[in-house]
Image: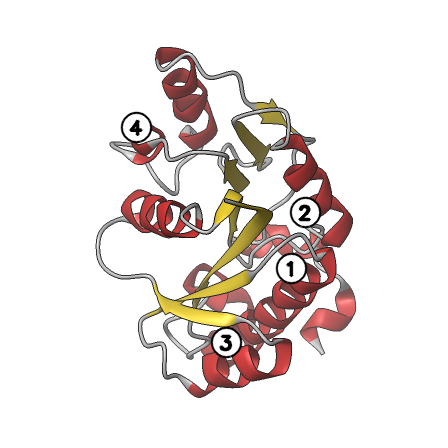
Amino acid sequence: MNQCCAIIVLAKAPVAGLAKTRLIPALGAQGAARLAQRMLDETLAAATEADVGPVILCCTPDIDHPAFTSAARRYGVVSTEQGGGDLGARMHRALTTALQGCAAAIVIGTDCPTLDAPHLRLAAQALQAAPAVFIPATDGGYVLAGLARPMPMLFESIAWSTDVVMAQTRERLAQIGVVAAELSPMQDIDLPADLIHLPREWLD
């Protein structure tokens, strides 16, 4: 087993009306799509800079979207399909596949501008001692999940996209007897009120 830590980036194609839809009231459909493209680029840059293992761009709805093919070429990453099911099913599938080739795997989205290469390295380091690592989000979810082995229960029957995701995940961890590492919480950019946490130049 390779001692690398894979980084999986779950990403939605930056298409107007599809990407960052909750930001459309503030940015418009085109503006939200442009921000989604910038966040995709910044996330892939951080993931490759972390240099802890292979970076996997896990795409929806279409792996052949020009934004994905261009990003995969530019950053030298592997692209895969997210596939069907809810967010939990897609994360579990991606992590389980990555763990076939690496000793650990991390899954992230593209919504957290402060999730940089040093934070990703810290998470990967945590997985050398702990079976799981999380970075909670300030809204009650999480911005990063990392595992050293598959744990399907962590991704089943969770109220995704709500403020109880991290709490429910902690309950599941306790149920299966896993002590996870937790790093300091971070801010997701999901709603118009969150835009104050975004680097100003990302909206140019």
**Viewer-side residue, 151 vs 34:** 151
Label 2: how many residues lie within 10 Å, few (<14), some (14-19) or many (20+)?
many
Name the image quarter holding residue 59.
bottom left
Q: CA distance from mark 2 to mark 3?
A: 25 Å
Q: CA distance from mark 1 to mark 3?
A: 21 Å
| Residue placed under numbered mark 3 in the picture | 33
**What is the secondary structure assignment of the residue under circle 2?**
helix
Asked whether disc 2 touches disc 1, contact meaning CB atoms under 8 Å apart, the reply is yes
**What is the secondary structure assignment of the residue under circle 1?**
helix
Identify residue type, mark 1. Ala
| Disc assigned to residue 47 | 1
Residue at figure coordinates x 58%, y 47% from the top left: 5
Name the image quarter holding residue 175.
top left
Q: CA distance from mark 1 to mark 4?
A: 26 Å
- Pinpoint residue 20: horizontal percent, then vertical percent: 46, 64
| Residue placed under numbered mark 4 in the picture | 153
Residue at figure coordinates x 34%, y 43% from the top left: 92
Q: CA distance from mark 2 to mark 1?
A: 7 Å
